[in-house]
Image: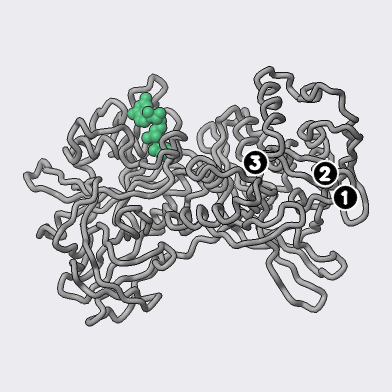
Amino acid sequence: MTDTPLSRIRNFSIIAHIDHGKSTLADRLIQATGSVALRDMKEQMLDSMELEQERGITIKAASVRLDYKAQDGETYVLNLMDTPGHVDFAYEVSRSLAACEGSLLVVDASQGVEAQTLANVYQAIDANHEIVPVLNKIDLPAAEPERVKQQIEDVIGLDASEAVEISAKSGLNIEGVLEAIVTRLPAPKGDASAPLKALLVDSWYDPYLGVIILIRVVDGTIRKGQKIRFMAEGTTQTVDSVGVFRPKMVPVDYLGPGEMGYLNAAIKTVAETNVGDTITDDRTPAAEPLAGFKPSIPVVWCGLYPVDADDFEKLRESLGKLRLNDASFHFEAESSAALGFGFRCGFLGLLHLEIIQERLSREFDLDLIATAPSVVYKLTDSKGVTSDLHNPADMPDPTQIDKIEEPWIKATIMVPDEHLGSILTLCSERRGQQVELTYVGNRAMAVYRLPLNEVVFDFYDRLKSVSRGYASFDYQMDGYDEGDLVKISILVNNEPVDALSFMAHRSQAERRGRSICEKLKDLIPRQLFKIPIQAAIGGRVIARETISAMSKDVTAKCYGGDISRKRKLLEKQKEGKKRMRQFGKVEIPQSAFIAALKMDS
Ligand SMILES: Nc1nc2c(ncn2[C@@H]2O[C@H](COP(=O)(O)OP(=O)(O)OP(=O)(O)O)[C@@H](O)[C@H]2O)c(=O)[nH]1
């Protein structure tokens, strides 16, 4: 674009544990470099989605270009990549790291190193990043910068003697961060005269402009009107425009080596672009593509069904629109005996699932039933043929199955010593295998192997509650292992409700079956007749509850006794069948489906 020499470009990410202050620091950097007029400065500039702002989390990685006049008198171009902090989105962290040469490692000086600090910093080290430690929140009385520096050195092995001490909230020492970026992070390398090589970092759908692609140019230049080729896909396109984020989109003439920005072409869906692909010039292509990244694989699946069968097409359209923005989300049509036509959807984790579900009801006004979230099992039948099981309802007759394998994770949990006991109990209840237990100051670091199935439902919530919020958690996938797994069917009024069936380890089957029956007993309103609720493995009933016949007051059986909940229930009853599903003679409220499957141990 401009003719900034490579020596005056810096591309960097900000990595941190959740809530340690990445987004606040990004806002300050934007503000300090005058990239946004003060009146346009909204808190959390980069968290643009409404949901992100409400939940206070960063979902999508975003990039912004800043101009900084440094103390050496030169003006530098700083390209900042913001990254999400939640474990479900770790995949996006690795993408943004691949586009940069350095990282700011933000650590909350009152909290110290946490599980995701470690996970992210190891990813940055793997990406050959130069790393500058930044101690944030030093305005807090509980801040202990010296202790945290020592921790960074002991645990991560990084020299923290020159860590930059800041308060992103008050703006203290933001200049120190900018100087560290310029003096301590390396400039990018690249050759402007070589054939174009640009990394496709991310892509999303903009309702006005169509598909926007975030790129990092490595060699050569890319400009408007140029015919480009996507090397993995082999497709070609003509560039409509290129530009940079300031953070608003600003068109430029071209982007050269070391630069980050966007490109826009006549591409219809995000699915046509392959994140990690290399973009080159169609006439003088590069010989070799850049090393891409691993594709994101959904680990949690569930069925989404419209409450009103007439909404099926609307649901298909809405899912299609969401997918335009989020290539890590998968869906395919399926049908269920009880729920009719719907979609099986794949997510990166439970938070991702909740966010998509919330967006469907909020942005598209859809009433949905979600079935039990499930991980992907690998089945081997008696003939040695293997297949993936995404939906417990599809589980074949167990006598035809030789082997069922389930996915495992390797989890790192950091927790103050006084809560360690309850964490270890929680992990062993969830079939965890301890790999390592070490101490970092007065914090214990436990590394466990755990079956993913035991983690997807509510492990994170349980971890927070048994440690009073002090435990931090991060995980990575760790292969498949054979397990003694069974399908548990739920029968309501003697009819199986396949949307409620789930897989569990045999040792947990009875406990979980019982807990679901107990919950359903509270969640299903009474009817004029008695309703048996049963959990069964094959033909064998392992748990049973009975809902007694109704008295006229529909709220009599409402758990909790909270008046507003009772009012809500009455309102729902008034709405009649709208939010209910009929199963034989019994109506099951929409809320029962997920609520029933949340485990408590
Ligand atoms: N006291 C104090 N609070 C801060 C400081 N920096 C950030 N915070 C607060 O810490 C909380 C988390 O900050 P964020 O910037 O949203 O954290 P994040 O790391 O970006 O979190 P995610 O986007 O969810 O990954 C917010 O309530 C901030 O106001 C600081 O320097 N001092």
Hey, what amino acid is under mark 3? Phe
Write down the quadrant of residue 57 in the picture. Answer: top left
Of helix, strand and loop, which one carries label 2?
helix
Q: Is residue 503 among the parts visible in the rendering?
A: yes
The answer to whether 552 is drawn above or below residue 453 in the figure is above
Q: Is mark 2 within 8 Å of ligand 1?
A: no
Residue 107 makes an appearance in the image: no
- Within 10 Å of disc 3 (Cα), the crowding (few <14, some 14-19, many 20+) is many
Q: Which residue is mark 2?
A: 513
For ligand 1, which image quadrant applies?
top left
Evaluate if marks 1 and 2 touch, with contact meaning CB atoms under 8 Å apart: yes
Q: Residues within 10 Å of mark 2 (few under 14, many from 20)?
A: many
Give the alpha-carbon distance from disc 3 to disc 2, as whole Å.
18 Å
Please say if 391 is above or below 413. Answer: below
Mark 1 — residue? 536
Q: Secondary structure at mark 3?
A: helix
**Relative image position of residue 271 (x, y in whole percent):** 44, 65
Q: Residue at x 33, y 23 (%)?
A: 139
Which residue is identified by label 3?
459
User: Residue 276: x, y in percent?
Assistant: 39, 65
| Residue 586 as seen in the image, left or right of residue 386 | right
